[in-house]
Image: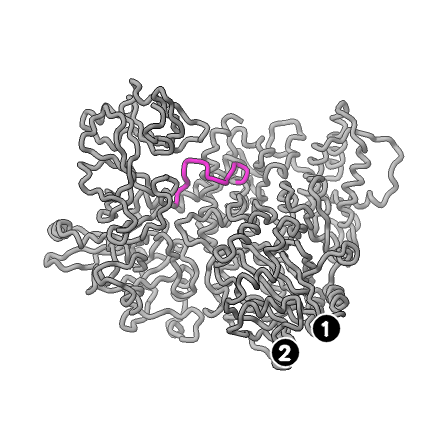
Amino acid sequence: MGDSLGLIGKRLLLLLNDGGSAAAAAGGAVEQAAWLRGTVRAVSVIGLVFVEFDDSHWRQRSWVQVYGDEVRAVLMESAIVWANCSDPSLSAAQWPALMFKPLVDHVGLGSLVPVEFFGPRTLAFLPNGSSLHTFEVGNCHKICVVIFLSVDVHNHLILGLCVIYVAGLSVLKDQNKVRRLKQSGESFLQDGSCINVAPHLHKCRECRLERYRKSREDEDDDDPNVSCRFFHFRRLAFTKKGVLRVEGFLSPQQSDSMAMGLWLPSLTVHEGLDLDTSKYILANVGDQFCQLVMSEKEAMMMVEPHQKVAWKRAVRGVREMCDVCETTLFNIHWVCRKCGFGVCLDCYRLRKNRPPEGRYDKGSVFSWLKCAKGQPHEPQNLMPTQIIPGTALYSIGDMVHAARGKWGIKANCPCTSRHNKPLSGAANSVGNGATSTSATTRPNGEPAAGAAVKTEPVEEAGIADTTSGFSGTNSSTPSPAPAPTQATKDGKGSSSALHWLADLATQKEPKGETNGVFTPDVKRICASLLLRHRHKKINVLNMFLFIYFCSFSLKQADKMKGGLPNFLDHIIASVVETKKSGTAPRREGLMGLSVLDPHTSHSWLCDGRLLCLQDPSNTNNWKIFRECWKQGQPVLVSGIHKKLKGNLWKPESFSKEFGDQDVDLVNCRNCAIISDVKVRDFWDGFQVISKRLKGGDGQPMVLKLKDWPPGEDFRDMMPTRFDDLMENLPLPEYTKRDGRLNLACRLPNFFVRPDLGPKMYNAYGLISTEDRRVGTTNLHLDVSDAVNVMVYVGIPEGDSDQEKKVMQTIEEGDVDDMTKRRVYEAKEKPGALWHIYAAKDAEKIRELLRKVGEEQGQENPPDHDPIHDQSWYLDQTLRRRLYEEYGVQGWSIVQFLGDAVFIPAGAPHQVHNLYSCIKVAEDFVSPEHVKHCFRLTQEFRHLSTTHTNHEDKLQVKNIIYHAVKDAVGTLKAHEPKLGRS
């Protein structure tokens, strides 16, 4: 047969003898036959086709004999057409579909035309094909489609088409259907704007806007970008007199399989998610998801018994937002039946619990918009509405608890329906990334009496606790060691293993020869034990015996240099800092991490509290990175500039390519904005002080570019630089847009994707003595994690003392000696001075700034925040007060050329440029810090409506939901492995 018919790459429908063809031949529905679907990957000259079937792994491709005896029908794709969708809720809509033609037909299709709809992949057999229309891009504005799931753009027939518009072919334009609806009185969905479908009924807020009326080119046609709030939400019906009336709204029970498909996991492994990553995500994000479910259940309890809950179908490319606080609406919210005004759970609860006399205060942060004719919106008159169809949310919640039990993933959620008992084989899978069940858990999965229910997240392969195998039994957890006595306040008498090791370090080394065989595996096990229990009290004797017998159990193996005492010295040297005097600053670094992966080149800055990875290309960086990252610590990665194309990031290249663009500049010294200047004016003075714009005093200004490139234009405006950056970002597992540990990539394309960058930060250096009290970027925090890369450092001409001034700034910046050596000895280019603080210390910093503000006579309005307002820079005096009065110590970091600074979500930080710098930042959402994203979203609600952080652009609840949904789906697909393990 060959490929003379051009079959390779095309869709195929196959029906075998045992696929229900007998029922079809007997008059049964052809659609109900067991059609196999797939894609042709190869064709043989002897009538064989190599098919990759849907919902099967690509390795399970099969050869099919097209004209074999067992084949009843073979249908091949032929064209893309418009076809009427048979879904009841979309009766008037036309969808793009793939039309098939029979290659083999022993069923007797006759005049039936097979089509497969894009998106839901529904299979239909249409009589005569009379309702089919040729798919042409040019007539999309005449016959359009409502799509609620991802369109299959992988098919070669649809590739190259620019867009499929979102609009509807209104049922009211079909006179036959209108006549039938009037006779039956049956209700139908509003499938167009209020203005075109029901102009005499209550119109939603969007349709009442005059701009919406004027933007329509044709009074009879809807705008392709439907923004009507009642579109496919409100139900209409004809009265006996033929007048349209409101019949109600969609209910959750009326959801269909297409809508559910967006919110339930697929039966296949998700792209970019492996087994270990799925377990890690569930361990770190599962608790937040459970809190989300509990919050939704509490919201449902606020619904009055007489109220019915409506269902508002999610619309592609539309982000539903609260009309009061502008937070993304995740699921339960309340809607006005007349105008579509919607409020989130928090705003609804706040207004409902508020005294009546204070509900209409114009000065309120959360003042409510009025309804038609100026009527106020009352909470009791709003309609409870959910976005997630049916009970999908609670189904995922059950799947989360079931998956945690089956895979031995511990939980610390407040749910009462937790299952902790793993299936057979799960307990021994800790080496593959699962954590075994707690010893305080009964065999039935319930906690034992008096047992603590708090547990720790699972860790991935390579970092998992492997000590459970030491006992020599199949028990998932070794017997708990006797609890040591509590250490005294002065540190004496402590029996923790770390203190024992620290004490041992001060003693003389014994002279005995103890040259045991110490393999890398034993070292890794010992290191894992040490690191896992670094904050716990463990039995000293057990730890020593474990290390001792691990080494001597392998006595017959090849001898390695160094025995047990030498290795103990290595561990002792790593943790001896914990024995420091209580007056010294608390050290949070993981000094023993070098034993985890000795091949990961790294060093420690900030007196051992800051990890600095020195090889950005090392594929094992994530292992040691994660240990610091999950504790909320920033991380530094150096050497990025050696991988970038240097010419792309020079200031003259930006000036040459974009010099004529109009931009706004900011004077870093007084925050004044300079408008209507050319971007060339900024770049010309980047490294030449004499060419800089001058202020009113005639002195050159210290400037920074404001929002350039603007908004989300970096990728479109600078595609080559975008590719150069994204290809060389360190820790790609986290930082790349499709990184397996970047939860933002789990948000389906159906939703409006959050703007995570990249974003450029271009500014001159603040060199003078007076400038040390101001920042290039004042103290603030971000809702997501971020990596900031120093791609260029420009040392300006015209100031002979600038190197001396820069070193003085570094000295006053509380920088450690190791960092200073990078300047003096390594001769690296310092670019910016950072001060980063732990997310948990944010409230203490607020207290200090409010106190200092009051001392200076400043006001503290309730809708403003000293950190979110970015109005403070912590100079040396304020940093000293913060440490002395609140015990808060941050990380003082100098970012050199090629350094990438990783900033955890919620961590307050500030930047002071030492020289002229070009920095590029990319945001991401890591599993370890989702809890901070969740909390910050709530904080931002209380900011003023003019605040830049007021709007919830991250959609963290949707990210959590879909990350967990994909993770449990992947775990479910791997469940057969449990039975074999």
Q: What residue type is labelled 1?
A: Thr
CB of mark 2 within 8 Å of CB of mark 1?
A: no
Q: Can residue 213 be seen in the rendering of this structure?
A: yes
Q: Position of residue 660 (x, y in %)?
A: 51, 67
Identity of the residue drawn at 17% across and 36% down: 128
Specify the label residue 856 is tagged with: 2
Look at the numbered disc 1 and give the secondary structure of its residue.
loop
What residue sits right under mark 1 in the picture? Answer: 769
Q: Is residue 795 left or right of residue 100?
A: right
**Predominant SS along the magenta part:** loop
Q: Is residue 405 magenta?
A: no
Identity of the residue drawn at 76% across and 22% down: 556
Q: In which quarter of the image is residue 57?
A: top left
Q: Quadrant of residue 903?
A: bottom right
Identity of the residue drawn at 78% across and 37% down: 567
Q: Can residue 903 be seen in the rendering of this structure?
A: no
Instruction: Please provide the residue range marked out in magenta.
Output: 263-277
Q: What residue type is labelled 2?
A: Gln
Look at the numbered disc 2 and give the secondary structure of its residue.
loop
Q: Where is residue 872 in the image (x, y as percent from the top left)?
A: 61, 70
Real-space Cα separation, disc 2 to disc 1, in angstroms: 22 Å
Q: Which of 638 and 332 is in front in this view?
A: 638
Q: Does the magenta stretch include residue 275?
A: yes
| Quadrant housing the C terminus | top right
